[in-house]
Image (cartoon, helix red, strand yellow):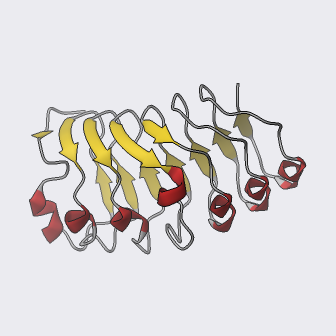
Amino acid sequence: DNFIVTETGLPEEFAYLTNIETIQLSYNLLQGILSGSVISKLQKLQHFEIESNYLSGPIPSELGALPDLIYVYIRRNSVDVQLHTMLATGLYPSLFSLWLDDNNVFGSIPDSIGQIQDLASFSVTNSSLTGSIPSTLGLLQGLRRVWLYDNKMTGSIPPQLSNLTRIEIFEIY
């Protein structure tokens, strides 16, 4: 909620913040592409919130390799997201919350989402998701909130989702 302006995603100087745990830069004027070389230096990062900026390009794979990353909020930008690549097996080992709404999200939700065991909140709305809801979503026993509305998804709701005993919100209209 300031007027912080960059044209290079996160400033290169952020690479020196090796002990930083939280980055909250939402509602600013961040522009450009997120640099994987900067992200890879933030090995203690737990909370990454950069929603409502002007970022573009792909989300760097280095973000998914951060061992303690719990919260990822990249809503309302213009980043390109291929969920099959982003949620590949072994990435985001500690992820609790992932919000990617209002970006260029393509493809379908991969089966590998069922391996992100700590995931409790997942939101990809107003995007271009296709395919159906994977049955592996039902493996996430701690899942509480899911928003998938305003996409191009098809198919039926998998019966395995009845295993989600903690679910509070599930919006797919």
Determine whether, in the image, residue 78 is placed left or right of residue 119. left
How far across and down, in percent of the image, does residue 164 sit?
A: 81, 52
Q: Is residue 91 above or below residue 87?
A: below
Quadrant of residue 39 within the rendered picture: bottom left
How far across and down, in percent of the image, does residue 50 sit?
A: 32, 44
How far across and down, in percent of the image, does residue 165 sit?
A: 84, 52
Determine whether, in the image, residue 41 is placed left or right of residue 85. left
Residue at 36% x, 54% y is 48
How far across and down, in percent of the image, does residue 43 sit?
A: 32, 74
Of residues 155 and 90, the one drawn nearer to the viewer in this rendering: 155
Residue at 55% x, 32% y is 125
Residue at 22% x, 73% y is 18
Question: How many numbered marks are there?
Answer: 0
Determine whether, in the image, residue 131 is placed left or right of residue 37. right
Residue at 11% x, 42% y is 6
Quarter occupied by the N terminus = top left
Of residues 129 and 28, the one drawn nearer to the viewer in this rendering: 129
Quarter occupied by the C terminus = top right
Of residues 36 and 94, the one drawn nearer to the viewer in this rendering: 36
Determine whether, in the image, residue 2 is placed left or right of residue 173. left
Quadrant of residue 56 within the rendered picture: top left
